[in-house]
Amino acid sequence: MFRRLSAEAFGTFWLVFGGCGSAILAAGFPDVGIGFVGVALAFGLTVLTMAYAVGGISGGHFNPAVSLGLALAGRFAYKDLVPYWVAQVVGGIAGAAVLYVIASGVAGYTPGGFASNGFDANSPGGYGMLAALVAEIVLTAFFLIVILGSTAKAVPAGFAPIAIGLALTLIHLISIPVTNTSVNPARSIAAAVFAQNGAMGQVWLFIVAPLVGGALGAAIWKYVLSPGESPAGIGQVE
């Protein structure tokens, strides 16, 4: 179990450090940066690379909503949910802490939003709470459908991380203007800890909505798209 939890912590560290780091350090640097398209790709690459690196150890979740969805779909043991959640949150906060140390190395630095998620004034596009809620639920649901589908036995083995990474990239391309994209409670908590824009007061939505979306996606896969299936794959930990 120690190796599995360590893998989840390192994977979530990389997701937060790489994804949020691209937004904080490179998105607009100094006048022309990678932009939100580059940030979207960075988040997808973090999951893709770590899924290949440690997916064989822990299943490569790096996200409490993914762990919940996999459990509901019969791919993951319920007894391991809380330990995985703790490892993911701890890893995410550690990644944000290292990122903060690096980002604050510039004179006059202020964290501001620190790549946190939000709605209303904290939404990049000024979207309200309902829009944020719907976006996070729907996008997390489809993320779980992609994860469960790409790791099914009928799909060629070894390609799942590519599909999952590209799905996360697409999700960010859609929702960065709306919520700055969460679909991951650990990522949201980690950024909110260091943000100075009131993000912690809104983080509840980015815990609840992805968990609901993860459960919804698992239910759609299990009962509509592939009833009764419970194959081994990247989401399965024996």
Image: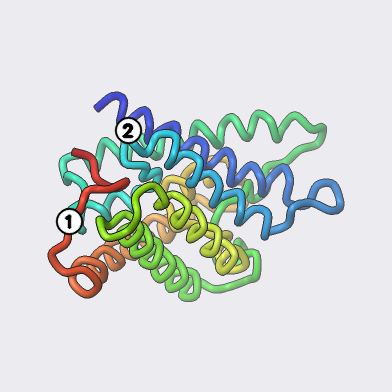
Please state, as top left, top right, bottom left or bottom right, where the N terminus lies in the image.
Answer: top left
**Residue 86, percent from left and from top:** 33, 36
Q: Mark 1 to mark 2: distance in Å?
A: 19 Å
Q: Is residue 226 left or right of residue 19?
A: left
Q: Nearer the viewer, residue 214 or 185?
A: 214
Tell me the kind of residue under disc 2. Answer: Ile
**Label 2 crowd bin: few (<14), some (14–19), many (20+), radius 10 Å:** some
Tell me the kind of residue under disc 1. Answer: Ser
Q: Which residue is mark 1?
A: 230
**Residue 102, percent from left and from top:** 68, 30
Q: Residue at x 46, y 39 (%)?
A: 50
Locate residue 149: give its quadrant: bottom left
Q: Residue at x 59, y 41 (%)?
A: 18
Dot 2: what SS? helix
Residue found at the very far top of the displayed protein:
2
Please state, as top left, top right, bottom left or bottom right, where the C terminus lies in the image.
Answer: top left
* Label annotation for residue 57: 2
**Residue 153, percent from left and from top:** 25, 56
Query: Residue 89: in sight, yes or no?
Result: yes
Indicate whether 69 appears above or below 192: below
Residue found at the very far left of the displayed protein:
228
Locate residue 134: give its quadrant: bottom left
**Residue 90, percent from left and from top:** 41, 33
Q: Is residue 62 left or right of residue 95?
A: left
Indicate whether 58 appears above or below 195: above
Q: Residue at x 79, y 33 (%)?
A: 106
Residue found at the very far right of the displayed protein:
31
**Label 1 crowd bin: few (<14), some (14–19), many (20+), radius 10 Å:** some
Query: Residue 65: in sight, yes or no?
Result: no
Dot 1: what SS? loop
